[in-house]
Image (spheres, rainbow, N blue to C red):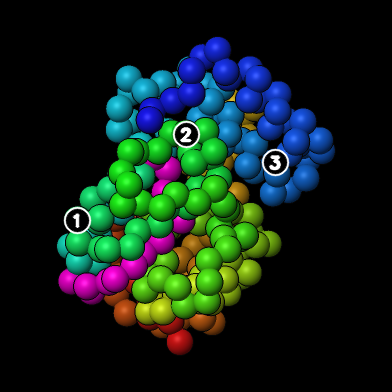
Amino acid sequence: MYSIEESKKKALLKKWKDDLFENWSEKNNNERRKYLELYVDSEKYKKERDDRGYGRGNHGKPMIEYIKSLKPDSIVDVGCGFGNFCNIVTEFIPNVYGADIASVKTGNVIENKKITFIDSDALNLDLPDKSVDYVVSFDCLEHCLEADIDSIMKNFARIAKKGFIFSIAYRQAGERSNHNEFLHMTVKPESWWLEIIEKYAVLVHREGSYYGEGSKYLCFEVK
């Protein structure tokens, strides 16, 4: 399932605007609107772009062997996009969840019955306590609002049995929304992120990402 038919786009956008965005300045709905539009209403992200389209990148790919070594039984990928990371890890993880605020609602997710997709943001992710071994999130947390980060981590610690695995960008994104808005809402140095995350988990592994010094992979065990 790659995209919604062109004939349905206008109706869907009107419904989302009517149902969710009566006040488009309301903080969380405003963020959700950015990504719904990027998936549905933008000529930049048509399916023929393949893995270069919005949400198609597999930012967690460099960590797959590390994750495999942990032998998890379950995992949730927050900000999963199209689901390319989830698709690969179903080969060795029995229970795989993918959560996203736009790709799931718009039907822009990979067809794999082994993945349970959830239409949710990071802040409101509603999974039972200690329901997955690891919460992972790649190139996503910087898109969340600064005021929500602590609550997001607290919720992740509630959900995760074992730990977190993140990649976090420490600089602004090169692209913007359809309304010329910034996509990275929390642009902070690594020390800022660690101060918050280490309230709930202990850093056990760290390595550079393909973004160079602008991003890192950070792996934690929950306290």
Q: Residue at x 48, y 39 (%)?
A: 103
Q: Is residue 44 visible?
A: yes
* Residues at circles 2 and 1 in contact by the CB criterion of under 8 Å: no
* Residue ranking furthest to the front: 113
Look at the image and say whether residue 79 sits in the magenta stretch: yes
Residue type beneath disc 1: Glu
Q: Amino acid at mark 3?
A: Asn
Above/below status of 137 relative to 210: below
Q: How many marks?
A: 3
The residue at the point 34 percent across, 67 percent down is 74
Residue beneath label 1, please? 91
* Left or right, residue 71 beside residue 193: left
Farthest residue toward the bottom?
Answer: 223
Where is residue 95 drawn, in percent x and y? 33, 62
Q: Residue 153 in the image: x percent, y percent?
A: 55, 70
Q: Amino acid at mark 2?
A: Gly
Q: Which secondary structure, mark 2?
A: loop
Check the image and name the residue furthest to the right.
23
Element at label 1:
loop
Q: Which mark is residue 30?
A: 3
**Circle 1 Cα neighbour tier, 10 Å, few/some/many (<14 / 14–19 / ≥20):** few
Label disc, if present, on residue 107 of the rendered structure: 2
Secondary structure of residue under mark 3 = helix
Is 88 in front, or is 208? 88
| Quadrant location of the N terminus in the rendered image | top left
Give the Cα distance between marks 3 and 1.
36 Å
- Separation of marks 2 and 1 at Cα, in angstroms: 23 Å
Residue at the outermost top position: 7
Magenta residues, start to end? 69-82
